[in-house]
Amino acid sequence: MNGELAAWLRLTLTPGVGQASQRKLLKTFGLPGQIFSVSHTALAAVVGAKAELLRETDNAKAAVEAALSWAALPGHRILTLADADYPPQLLEISDPPTVLYVAGDAALLSNPALAVVGSRNATPQGIRIARDFATTLAQSGWVIVSGLALGIDAAAHDGALAAGGGTVAVVGTGADRLYPARNKALADRIRKNGVIVSEFPLGTPAAAENFPRRNRVISGLARGVLVVEAAPESGSLITARLAGEQGREVFAIPGSIHSPQSRGCHHLIRQGAKLVESTRDILEELGAFSTPAPDAPLTTDATGETGFVLTRLGHDACALDELAQRTGLTADRLLPLLLELELEGRVAPLPGNRYQAMQNTK
């Protein structure tokens, strides 16, 4: 078995032989063991000058040995296109990764999954929405897929884990690298209770060009992609576009017309993404594995002055001066009321001396 895996690793770790060339070789000759047994002339007829790279066994020897050692550690696996455990959903896309480096529960990669993605610079409301949606979806039997980035991704992973559900983190580095460093504790939790997966060789650092490739795996593993918050140039829109090209469902949560983080979602909705107001919208579209909890509306059950302030605050972010006009209260009186609501988790402070009511979205 190690000999077969070593051949797959040699194919994928030989410098200069990219995934397009790997696909050509596999399609022409079959398994990697056969690729390395044919003549130089036969290889050159398929990949041209790159055939010479494949003849040099020392080109990838150290990297192959390191990968085999990594795969032998507890909780680690390297899946190839020929493995029975390779995620069947990824086989449906046009360019599935030749190998996957897996840390954690590899079985989760084949379970019904939904991707939840969004802005790294998410608002407190966006983070809460992502976490709540992931929690409810995980409770309904869905594995939550995301990219381990700050903001929405981290909230989605955390929500799935909090529900005792499965979560998949698809990373744009080697599976032995951590990016961003601030998510170390979360990554440790995912390795123990979920799975981290990468198509990139061990030791690959974070690089901008890796993340669009990573995004096609996020969408490829899932039946649909939910975008919670996204700026107009967000990488989440790339994931949504790839999802559409792969035949996956695309969902987007609308937001305030004044919020830059909502514009990407509004763009997706104009392009045909399904507008989502609750998890029920997703579960009805994709099908639920268990009966979800009833949708919970925006809660305003605080009483007295705090309830009055919360009602006047409404759904969108509101500046302190504007809230003073809505309520007729002075800023000095509003600030302690807002602090009380913040401590109760009902209001979140935003940059620019603004506040936003937190919505229960389960």
Image (tube, helix red, strand yellow):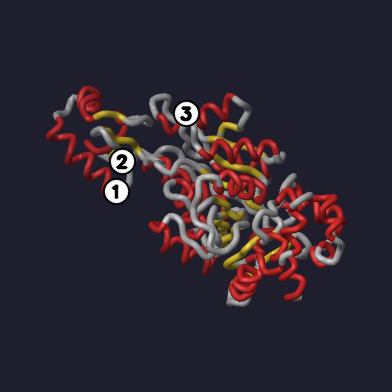
Say if residue 141 shows up in the picture.
yes
Q: CA distance from mark 3 to mark 1?
A: 29 Å
Q: Is residue 37 left or right of residue 244?
A: right
Q: What amino acid is labelled 1 in the image?
A: Glu
Where 149 falls versus 353 (above or below)?
A: below
Residue 259: percent from left, percent from top? 39, 29
Q: Residue at x 72, y 59 (%)?
A: 53
Q: Which residue is labeled 1 in the image?
A: 344
Closest to the camera, between mark 3 and mark 2, is: 3
Residue 358: percent from left, percent from top? 37, 40
Q: Is residue 140 left or right of residue 48?
A: left
Marks 3 and 1 close (CB-CB < 8 Å): no
Judged from the image, the secondary structure of the residue bearing numbered disc 3 is helix
Where 275 falls versus 290 (above or below)?
A: above
Q: Which residue is labeled 3 in the image?
A: 263
Q: CA distance from mark 3 to mark 2?
A: 22 Å
The numbered dot on residue 347 is: 2
